[in-house]
Amino acid sequence: MNGVSSTTATRSGFSSLKAATPEDKLRSIVASLDRLGLLDLASGFLEDEHQLEKLIKLAASDSNLELLAKVESLSRLVAKPDYRGLENILTLVSETRGSMAITKAN
């Protein structure tokens, strides 16, 4: 890359995005998603109603929403990995799973 490190090129790419218009930023994001193949993946999900329905049900499940509500606590615990933190993470997750088992049993 003409003697420019990839880190420098990436930084200059970020600085040019800061100066870019919202439309330019969106084009850049879409181009990146396309390059990574994520647009094809999203398109495939949108075309298959059965898969899309399963994905929405999974994302909106009670257990996922409970975990999402606990994400701040979980992220603090993950940030400082130690035995006590791991124990607390397992407790938070198992409480969520336990409440789901109770909900399904009713």
Image (cartoon, grey):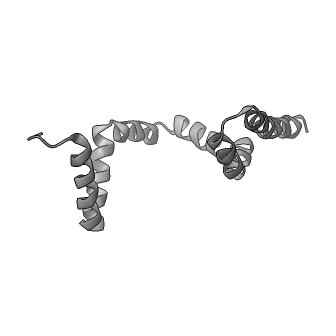
Q: Position of residue 79 (x, y in %)?
A: 62, 43
Residue placed at 71% from the left, 52% from the top?
A: 69
Query: In the picture shown, does residue 59 fall above or below 24?
Result: above
Residue placed at 78% from the left, 36% from the top?
A: 84
36 or 59: which is nearer to us?
36
Q: Where is residue 102 in the image (x, y as percent from the top left)?
A: 89, 37
Number of numbered callouts drawn: 0
> Relative to residue 45, is residue 73 drawn left or right?
right
59 or 14: which is nearer to us?
14
Query: In the picture shown, does residue 57 fall above or below 30?
Result: above
8 or 47: which is nearer to us?
8
Q: Position of residue 19 (x, y in %)?
A: 25, 67
> Relative to residue 96, is residue 25 drawn left or right?
left
Q: Position of residue 100 (x, y in %)?
A: 81, 38
Q: In which quarter of the image is the N terminus?
A: top left
Residue placed at 21% from the left, 47% from the top?
A: 9
